[in-house]
Image: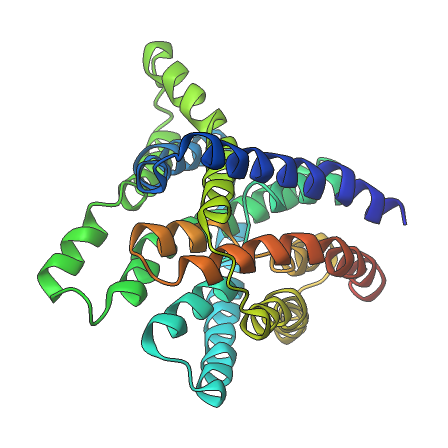
């Protein structure tokens, strides 16, 4: 019950307030969703990724274990989603939006505070979550863009769009700067900090603006399918993969917890930026965030009991 209350008060309610502010601002001023989307893709997201990777302390052993886990988990999750989508006979646009709502999860502004709450600021489990966050930032900016635009753009334009994403270059740059112990001058790092600190607020306001601009034609069955796959099947699969590799202790717990979080804002940003089922994507993010207070609490209990 303590976890339930903490998640509600420190994760869900603050997120909901920011989303509500975004919706209200749209109603008052008709904010341009496309401009907000571009700010997230090309400015705020790269800045927060550079800052977190540059400041982290990740060992190569942990990096290898987490990347192995993520590769297997991600492939199996994609396979499960593909089977469900074929059974439900979704069309191309809905297929990519449904897939993105399940395989892209909130590994930054939800999972990192949650990780620090559950593991009491443990730097090891934080490094595990940062690696997951890195992959969950890289893939939407590459595969995510490809899946949304395949069939809409010619190959040349599609690759030009993918290669224009700053996150692709920020990740190796951050590792290089940290590996060679390069000190970023304060005149440069201070603006990076300013922009990175604005990422969460801007992303949540963008979601609120999208929700506020919708006609709210509810897609309850589709949203429910997305929520079940993300919040129930996702962590259950995570348990299976850590048991497959024989991971135990804090590593196993952090990995399972990392995949129990709700749908990522990146799925909404992709849907809005490339006009691909934005209403469904927004509803999936909002509802999964609300339902996660119950499912994540259960996962926290389960990992502590089953993965000591």
Q: Is residue 267 above or below residue 42?
A: below
- Judging from the image, the colouring scheme is rainbow
Q: Which residue is drawn at 58% across and 75% down?
A: 221
| Quarter of the image where one finds residue 275 | bottom left
**Image side of residue 6 versus residue 206, left or right:** right
Q: Is residue 119 visible?
A: no
110 or 55, nearer to the observer? 110
Q: Nearer the viewer, residue 120 or 244?
A: 120
Residue 277 location (% of width, % of height): 39, 63
Looking at the image, can residue 9 be seen? yes
Farthest residue, direction top: 187
Q: How many marks?
A: 0
**Which image quadrant is residue 153 in?**
bottom left
Residue at far right of view = 1
Q: Is residue 225 above or below residue 213?
A: below
In percent of width and height, residue 39 lies at: 33, 34
Task: Say which quadrant the C terminus sits in.
Answer: bottom right
Q: In this view, does 276 lie above or below 22?
A: below
Please give the name of the residue rendered at 44% of the width and 64% of the height, measured from the top-left corner.
Answer: 100
Q: Does residue 176 lie above or below 130 as drawn?
A: above
Residue appearing at x 48%, y 36% in the figure: 27
Horizontal side of residue 63 vs 187, given as left or right: right
Residue 148 left/right relative to 248: left
Q: Residue furthest bottom?
A: 87
37 left or right, relative to 13: left
Foreground residue, 280 or 95? 280
Residue plotted at (68% across, 72% down): 236
Residue 74 drawn at (x, y percent): 48, 68
Residue 244 is situated, as x and y percent measured from the top left of the image, at: 63, 76
């Amino acid at each position: 019950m303590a976890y339930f209350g903490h998640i509600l008060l420190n994760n869900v309610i603050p997120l909901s307030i920011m989303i509500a502010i975004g919706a209200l601002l749209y109603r008052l001023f008709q904010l341009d969703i496309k401009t907000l989307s571009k700010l997230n893709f090309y400015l705020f997201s790269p800045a927060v990724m550079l800052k977190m990777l540059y400041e982290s302390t990740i060992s190569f052993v942990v990096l290898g274990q987490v990347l192995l886990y993520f590769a297997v988990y991600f492939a199996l999750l994609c396979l499960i989603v593909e089977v469900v989508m074929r059974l439900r006979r979704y069309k191309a646009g809905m297929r990519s939006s449904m897939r993105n709502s399940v395989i892209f999860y909130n590994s930054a502004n939800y999972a990192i505070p949650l990780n620090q709450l559950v593991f009491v600021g443990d730097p090891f489990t934080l490094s595990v979550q940062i690696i997951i966050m890195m992959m969950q930032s890289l893939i939407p900016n590459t595969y995510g863009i490809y899946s949304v635009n395949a069939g809409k753009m010619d190959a040349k334009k599609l690759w030009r769009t993918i290669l224009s994403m700053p996150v692709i270059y920020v990740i190796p740059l951050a590792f290089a700067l940290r590996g060679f112990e390069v000190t970023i001058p304060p005149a440069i790092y201070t603006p990076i900090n300013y922009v990175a600190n604005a990422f969460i607020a801007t992303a949540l306001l963008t979601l609120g603006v999208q929700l506020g601009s919708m006609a709210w034609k509810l897609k309850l069955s589709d949203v429910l399918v997305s929520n079940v796959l993300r919040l129930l099947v996702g962590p259950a699969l995570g348990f299976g993969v850590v048991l497959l590799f024989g991971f135990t202790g804090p590593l196993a717990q952090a990995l399972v917890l990392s995949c129990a979080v709700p749908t990522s804002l990146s799925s909404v940003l992709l849907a809005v930026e490339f006009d691909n089922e934005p209403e469904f994507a927004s509803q999936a993010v909002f509802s999964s965030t609300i339902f996660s207070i119950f499912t994540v609490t259960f996962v926290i209990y389960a990992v502590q009991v089953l993965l000591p």
